[in-house]
Image (cartoon, helix red, strand yellow):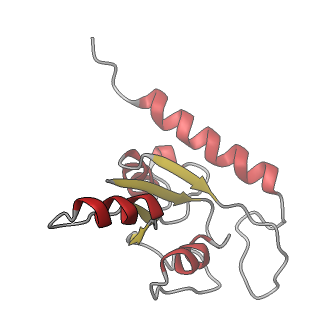
Amino acid sequence: MSFSVGIVGLPNVGKSTLFKALTKKPVDIAPYPFTTIHPNLGVVLVPDERLEKIAELVKPEKRTPSAIEFIDIAGLLKGAHKGEGLGNQFLAEIRNCQALLEVVRGFEASGVENVLGQVNPEKEIGTIKTELLMKESMKPKVS
């Protein structure tokens, strides 16, 4: 069984760095926005001692461990619900995820561009929340 988790946040907050740490996959990481344009995909198998013990008893032909699929999604900007930045692509990608993991910037780094111009996690969370709500409210209603 697989479970998909979209890694979301503003540009340059550490989404790809987290993705790389979780999946051990090589990805481009740079100190400027939109290094990630197309989503990075990685699957991590979830170790489960119970599965191993059951397999020892039952001796199945095949063992399928649970897995988590991580999707490193391009950074979101204010106005994404109107298609600004990579907004449409970002919002389309998250629609396919079963869970979202939001990364916010909590660090100062002069060499890493900050799209807000300041470290403000609360504002980042508000931007992401607003964009998700706005995009949802713009969907055509089915009667």
Whether 101 is drawn above or below 133: the answer is below
Would residue 76 be found to the left or right of residue 138 on screen?
A: right
Would residue 95 be found to the left or right of residue 112 on screen?
A: left
Residue 34 in the image, given as x and y percentages of width and height = 52, 74
Q: How many marks?
A: 0
User: Residue lying farthest left?
Assistant: 61
Residue at image point 58% right, 79% down: 21
Residue 123 seen: yes
Residue at image point 27% right, 63% down: 64
Residue 113 in the image, given as x and y percentages of width and height = 71, 78
Residue 97 in the image, given as x and y percentages of width and height = 41, 50
Rendering quarter of residue 104: bottom right
Quadrant of the image containing the C terminus? top left
Residue at image point 42% right, 72% down: 37
Residue 66 seen: no
User: Residue lying farthest front?
Assistant: 57
Residue at image point 72% right, 82% down: 112
Residue nearest the viewer, comparing 56 with 21: 56
Whether 19 is drawn above or below 27: the answer is above
Whether 100 is drawn above or below 38: the answer is above
Residue nearest the viewer, comparing 79 with 93: 93
User: Residue lying farthest top?
Assistant: 143
Would residue 123 be found to the left or right of residue 21 on screen?
A: right
Residue nearest the viewer, comparing 64 with 82: 64
Residue nearest the viewer, comparing 118 with 49: 49
